[in-house]
Amino acid sequence: MNESRGAILERIRSGRLGAPVQSRLDPPTLIPTKDSSSLRDRFVQEAEAVGAIVHRSDRRDLTVETVLRILGDAGVKRLISWEPNDLPISELMKAVVDDGVQLVDPPTPANAETLSREWTAMATADAGLTGAVGGLADTGTIVLRSGPGRPRLTWLLPPLHVVVLHSSFVHPTLSAFMGECGELVRCSSHVAFVTGPSRTADIEQTLTIGVHGPKEVHILLVDHDCKSIEESEAAQAATVSDEPGDQMSKHDLVQ
Amino acid sequence: MSQTTYSAQLFATCLVDAIRPAAGLATLRLLERLGVKVIVPSGQTCCGQPAFNSGCLADARAMARYTIDLLEKSPVPIVVPSGSCGDMIVHRYRELLADELAYASKVERVAARTYELSQYLSDVLKVQDVGARCRRTITYHPSCHLLRGLGVRSAPSKLLDSITDARCVGLSGAEDCCGFGGTFAVKMGELSSGMLDRKLDAIVESGADTVVACDAGCLMHIESGLKRRGSNVAVRHLAEVLVESE
Amino acid sequence: MNSPSMSFQQRVSHALADGQLRIALDRTTERFTSNRVAGLASLPDADAVRDCARSIRLHTLSKLDDYLEQFEANVTSVGGQVHWASDAQEANEIVLDLARSRSVKRVVKSKSMVSEETELNQALISGGLDVVESDLGEYIIQLAGETPSHIIAPAVHKTREQVGQLLADKLGVPMTDDPVEMTATARSALRDVFLQSEMGISGVNFGVASTGSLAIVTNEGNASLTVTAPRIHVAMMGIERIVPTLDDLAVMLLVLARSATGQKLTVYTDLLTGPRRGDPDGPEELHVVLLDNGRSRLIGTEVSEVLACIRCGACLNACPVYQQIGGHAYGSVYSGPIGAVLTPSLDREGPWHVLPEASSLCGACREVCPVRIDIPRMLLALRAETVHSGKGNRWVRVGFWLYRIAATKPWLFRCGVSVVRQLTKMFFVNGWLLRLPSPLPSWTRSREFPVIASRTFSEEMRDREKGSGDE
Ligand code: SF4
């Protein structure tokens, strides 16, 4: 290690010499209720307040139908999607393709050693389709996690982002999510907490939507059984109990 | 409060003493009218705040020790008609004299029984209406150290609201500083004037004919600004309007 | 930090005379303030959360060395690399070396105050690299060739008309004063930059010691793109930006956005833990540059609390001085109340001792700070240090020394008051006021000078005593 490392640590040590370690206070519990229906309502209310559009569905076919309608209404011709197994409803992608939407593949196969980083094709997509690993009720946030079948540019590049969130994944707060699913952070290179569409207020603090990220975010909050959800719940449970390294390889096998 | 007899010592502060004696006299009269037996310790000068704020700590310490010794002579509560000096005694003396063991307990004792005037009226005497009467349209400027230092937010307005025949009007940006800040107003004159201008605009806009504050520094600053503008808005210390009974 | 060429007083005069600046600040300050109030009000127990957030920051600082080592170990274990930089120059060299050794030509940046502090852009550009800022505000000031004037809103000093003109001049688009159109222009101009840069440089809001994660928040999504598309990600952070755990991070995020913009959470809160792991995008390499640049020396001093700052910018928006002069007048990267403490603390040799003087000590900053940093107390400590080291104004020092002599001897105090009374009366009568020695004229330019009362309070009291004695 370089000299600076030692010098910096040494300066800190001599500065804190003789001073006690200060204690941390416990954070106050902000949302006492864990009642799931009010959690979902709160999620919808907060997500809408930040400009996301929430669609609720309690039937698998309705969910598929809604996604097709959203894409159709927006005139989407080209779509980036996560791998079918990484979406809460595995048949969703096929339905979209059957509907005549063209899929834009990431430039390089998922397991390639090096990426070509030729993003221009992806940049032409009109929409991105993903599945959330969590929702935060008190802020209307969706939680996305990168991985082999889950390119990050999907939720970043296209002007429209459609994300499916199973309602059992809604947590009261960020703190609650970290408490229960902190391991997800450890074992993913990128976990994004996305709260509404991209915005800026850099010009005179005037709110403008859709700067670099999507202008529109549609959240499908679904209540129905979906097989793949159970799978991913199981995967999540496994994640929590495993070492990050092990978990990663296991996840790779799932793909 | 009629049964108990209250005693207090009045620490007038240097600015009231030299620039605004009317505020000191009004405080004295007001307290006496409310049945308080008031002592005015003789030999009182300055709490040391100006030196403290300018970083002249040795000088500030000397003045703080002097003031503490003076106020320690009597065990009765200390009333200060000025938020910033009150804050100095209640909060800053502790830091300033932290290394002086001989003063540690004295500082705590004096700090614990020091009150700014409106604080004393509302927290100790528990009065909200002192029976004042005047025909004024009043706006209130909450001075920074009273508001954010001592945390006195509503007492002065409540007292003003109780004045018969007076009308209280809001002040936009009320909680913004008037730009005084002691030597700041001299060292950073332009900056300070800019801040004062905003305050004066708000005062004029409020439609009040009288602006009231609880700190001789702000009063002096606002008054000198209004005077330069040729405005006829009157500038009064809280005590001065509370003793009126026209 | 480079020293500005004008004196502070000159910069203040400049700023006060700048009508456009006044308009820009007036248009935004109010919005900032009402947003922040609403933001904190949306927390059920804001005071308790703030206390908790403060305790987390102070706890971290009280064993920062341990947490830094833990952070480093965890970044390394997930495949990242940590570089330690004692000063700005070392930090810039680290980044430049990384770029050179990996044949990087194009660099895209998302907002980083630390890189502003080290003046990284200049270093990279003179090293032959193309550097483009991607935060809209930063992009605007990069086009204008300026520096940020606010921690979270770098271009807050510009009116929308000025921005419209700038875009028209630099990009050849039609002039507009509509922020929506301007934003669209920037979006399309920056798209290719994200996708074609080989290196992305970001700041870091918090580094999580227990996981080695980097938390980066933006509303625009520019940081997310900056750390996703390019092959190499370099994250610049001050050594104090550590939180121990993800739980602690969650608490800090409760107050950060609320205090900064009034949002409950920023639109994009990205947690990066190492480079890509078989993902089809994301960086191949992740480098964290830990910058000291004067910070470690502050631990254990009277201003160590300044390291608890989470750079939310709330104190700038609350500050009446900042509102008068904006950020540039401070002459350094960090402006406003926090800058007035941070700048002279980090750079002891610089010409900064005037900054702590630029405050009326009104306490608005302390009141709004989400981690309750006592900025006024530290301004006072810095003022005292200036006096102690003999750098301060001699006039003031001698004045207070005389004043103290008088104020601790009541008879002398009374004499002093009457002498000054005579003097001021004379000046007033003869109208000599404006010819008073410096610095008094700066008072009288806009205000009258107060006269000493013809009978002081203590004179009244003495008479009263005499009167009652006579009875
Ligand atoms: S000092 Fe406090 S209010 Fe100011 S930027 Fe830092 S955290 Fe925010």
Image (cartoon, rainbow, N blue to C red):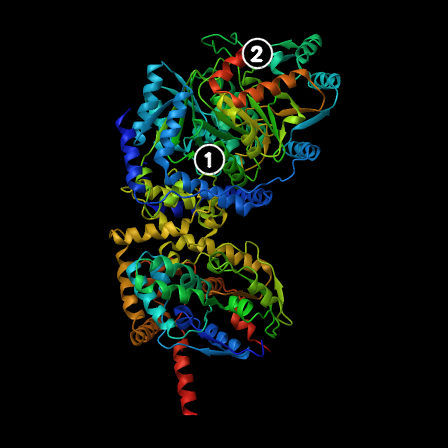
Q: Residue C191 at what x, y percent from top left?
A: 52, 19
- The correct choice, above or below, for B218 with respect to A131 in the image is below
* Secondary structure under the numbered disc 1 in the rendered image: loop
* Secondary structure under the numbered disc 2 in the rendered image: helix
Query: Which residue in the rendered view is the most extreme toward the left?
Result: C390
Q: Quadrant of ligand 1?
A: top left
Judging depth in this view, the residue of C434 and C272 nearest the camera is C272
Judging depth in this view, the residue of C191 and A147 nearest the camera is A147
Instruction: Give the residue at mark 1.
Output: C154
The chain identifier of the residue carrying mark 2 reads A
- The correct choice, above or below, for C323 with respect to C283 in the image is below
Q: Residue B7 at what x, y percent from top left?
A: 48, 76
Tell me the kind of residue under disc 2: Val
Give the residue drawn at x 29%, y 44%. C351
Q: Residue C408 at what x, y percent from top left?
A: 30, 70
Give the residue drawn at x 49%, y 63%. B226
Tell me the kind of residue under disc 1: Pro
Query: Which residue in the rendered view is the most extreme toward the front?
Result: A241
Instruction: Give the residue at mark 2.
Output: A254
Is residue C19 in sight in this rendering? no
Count of numbered circles in the view: 2
**Do the CB atoms of the residues marked 1 and 2 lie less than 8 Å apart?**
no
A33 left or right of C112?
Answer: right
**Mark 1 CB lies closer than 8 A to ligand 1:** no
Give the residue drawn at x 27%, y 30%. A6
Q: Residue B104 at what x, y percent from top left?
A: 35, 62
